[in-house]
Amino acid sequence: MTIPQDLAEQLARFRARRFLAFPLAGSMAWAAVGIAGLFLSGFSIALFFCATGVIVYLGLALSHLTGEYKAGKAQPKNVFDPLFFLVEVYAVTIVVLERRWRRIASA
């Protein structure tokens, strides 16, 4: 498959994706945590740990059903894929640094 050189065409392809599998997987995992938290109060830490880890695998399984398989190597490369990842990393970094700054400021 050829890589489209036009940036507007790549943006159109990026926006045309559905992105349903992973938000759906996260919703299912956290709904299970909420329901199980009502009945299993002693296992909350293990439940959070397992639910966080299962989101990726559940998302990959759901991506087959929704037709948006993410781990396939046959997908054409897009400029906006790494950009989306970098925005997520930047957001997490801001949260971590802000918490450290509050700890330092309060000491």
Image: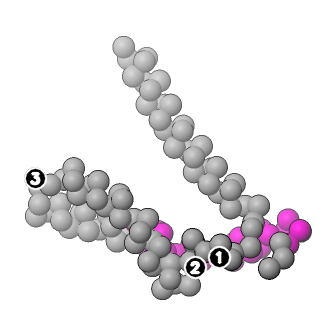
Q: Which residue is mark 2?
A: 68
- Counting residues from the start of the chain, the first of labels 1 and 2 encountered is 1
Residue 23: image x %, image y %? 47, 68
Query: Does 75 sit above or below residue 105?
Result: below
Q: The N terminus is located in which quarter?
A: bottom right
Element assignment for label 1: loop
Q: Which quadrant holds residue 19?
A: bottom right
Amino acid bearing label 2:
Glu
Residue 104: image x %, image y %? 42, 18
Label drawn at residue 17: 1
Q: Residues within 10 Å of mark 2 (few under 14, many from 20)?
A: some
Q: CA distance from mark 3 to mark 1?
A: 40 Å
Q: Residue 44: tell me if it is visible.
A: yes
Question: In this orientation, which residue lies closer to the viewer: 34 or 65?
Answer: 65
User: Left of 5 or right of it: where is 61?
Assistant: left
User: Left of 48 or right of it: where is 52?
Assistant: right
Amino acid bearing label 3:
Gly
Element assignment for label 2: loop
Element assignment for label 3: helix
Q: Residue at x 33, y 67 (%)?
A: 29
Question: In this orientation, which residue lies closer to the viewer: 77 or 17?
Answer: 77
Q: Which residue is mark 3?
A: 42
Query: Does 16 sit above or below residue 35?
Result: below
Q: Which quadrant holds residue 3?
A: bottom right
* Magenta-colored span: 4-26
Q: CA distance from mark 2 to mark 3?
A: 37 Å
